[in-house]
Image (spheres, rainbow, N blue to C red):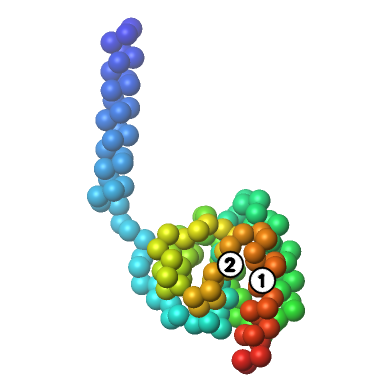
Amino acid sequence: MDKIIQFIIALFIVVAAGSVAYLVFFAPSAPTNVSLPVNDSIVYYFYGQGCPHCAKVEPFMENMTKEYPDVDIRMLEVWYNQTNQQIYTQVNAQAGISTPPGVPEIVIGKTVLVGDQDIPNKLEAYLRVIEKKK
């Protein structure tokens, strides 16, 4: 009986290692053709579905989209959407951030606001400036 259990465990380890190797070396990567210009008139709001901090910011963001309808506010879920994850990484890189800080996050050009305190306290001032440019 012990030999059967050892065999099953060994088989499981081999299958798991093979799966990891496949994902690392052979699985097709996500498309990388997403290209975004650095633009300080676009407001990127990155959030994660199920994130408690994002949930606190959500009503504020909904209100901002209504108060500033002429401002291009792009609300992108990044925990479960691969395309949005790529945009998240690229927008942060263009803002000079190699490791994104997490969600909720706002990126406007090279300006970054992070968290359920920073975003509600500072975003509206940026939105006013963007709106005046239009």
Q: Which residue is mark 1?
A: 122
Q: Is residue 123 visible?
A: yes
Q: Quadrant of the N terminus?
A: top left
Q: Secondary structure at mark 2?
A: strand
Tell me the amino acid under the disc marked 1: Lys
| Residue at (55% x, 80% y) in the render | 42
Relative placement, left or right, of 125 versus 34 is right
| Residue at (70% x, 66% y) in the render | 120
Depth check, front residue: 10 or 114 = 114
* Sequence order check, earlier mark of 2 and 1: 2
Q: Position of residue 3 (x, y in %)?
A: 28, 10
Q: Quadrant of the C terminus?
A: bottom right
Q: Is residue 95 positioned above or below 56 on the image?
A: below
Tell me the amino acid under the disc marked 2: Leu
Q: Residues within 10 Å of mark 1 (few under 14, many from 20)?
A: few
Q: CA distance from mark 2 to mark 1?
A: 8 Å
Q: Position of residue 86 (x, y in %)?
A: 43, 65
Relative placement, left or right, of 18 versus 92 is left
Q: Quadrant of residue 7?
A: top left
Q: Position of residue 46 (x, y in %)?
A: 56, 64
Q: Secondary structure at mark 1?
A: helix
Marks 2 & 1, CB-CB < 8 Å contact: yes
| Residue at (40% x, 63% y) in the render | 98
Task: Tell me the tag on residue 54.
Answer: none
Q: Which residue is mark 2?
A: 113
